[in-house]
Amino acid sequence: MHGVKLRLTPQSVVTGRILDDFGDPITGVQVAMMAPLMISGQRQMVFTGGFGASNDIGEYRLAGLAGGKHTFCANSGVRAVRIQNSWVPYGEQCIGPITLAAGFNTTVDFQLHPIPSRHVRGVISGGPDGATPQIVLDCGSGTFSGGVGADRAFDIVSLASGACTLIASGFDETDRLTATLQVQIGSEDIEGLHLHLEKSLSISGTVKTYSGAGMKPGASQFSVSLLPSSRNIPSSIQTAWNDDRTAFTFTNVTPGNYHFQFTATPPLYVRSATVAGSRPSRTPNSLPGQGHRILK
């Protein structure tokens, strides 16, 4: 081959300022180039290149960016800024998609708003006497923890809004105890919640191989896993197989929403799958309370 030409595309630059409600600059806010991506069945914004932070006058600069359509997000990391002897937390703002022309500069300015805080209060029951459980509030924009008193009452200050999950955990000797509760964070404090700790679940399943040639796959050719849909579900799942690798059991599973994943290498492929005798959906299946689930 002769005369091959490679055309280099010049990179782009994005600059701008980050201000508060009063038009004053906010220092130390992170700015990144993002793009939507489906992860475990959920649409999430992921980092795709270009990262910077605002300086003392609220200015930032992202260089070396590829041309195309991108979304830019400014996130203070639920960071508090001192204003008139009080600490005010600021949230996140995303702008886009914005078309970047290769080799040109573009300005993207942000204005972040204060996040009102709400209290989430309640009590935890169950488990051995004298043991103090732990509790976290898992929201899409972050995770918030709170203290648990001797009377097992908890108080969490949330800077997020929308659908969140309360997760309490503890131990009874070697058994993990958990409790989860869905809460909707609005404009007011939430009072009087109750979580009861229970032992973890066990989930069993079977694997059948269909082969006209009588093929028997090896142990390295397929595997199973149970993936929590929330990154903060407390879990230390263990997987045990029988001797001929036709049945498996997940133990120490925390109640919550999960994705079941079956991985196989060619020429193997998944012919069918059922959960408790019916075909599963593509959304996470909920495992509430104690029990024993069957996968095939």
Image (cartoon, rainbow, N blue to C red):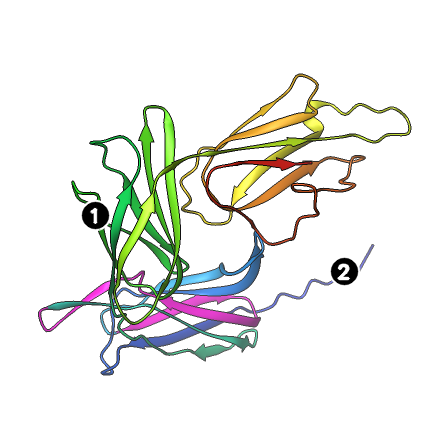
Residue at which label 2 appears = 4
Residue 112 or residue 5, whichever sits in front: 112
Dominant secondary structure of the residues highlighted in magenta in the image: strand
Tell me the mark number nearer the camera, choosing from 2 and 1.
1
The mark found on residue 90 in the picture is: none
The mark found on residue 153 in the picture is: 1
Tell me the SS state at disc 1: strand
Tell me the SS state at disc 2: loop
Number of numbered discs on residues: 2
Residue drawn at 53 percent across, 68 percent down = 11
Whole-percent x, y for residue 105 in the image? 47, 77
Amino acid type indicated by mark 1:
Ala
The part of the chain drawn in magenta is: 58-85
Q: Is residue 290 magenta?
A: no
Residue 7 or residue 63, whichever sits in front: 63
Q: Looking at the image, is 11 positioned above or below residue 173?
A: below
Whole-percent x, y for residue 135 in the image? 30, 45
Q: Is residue 79 magenta?
A: yes
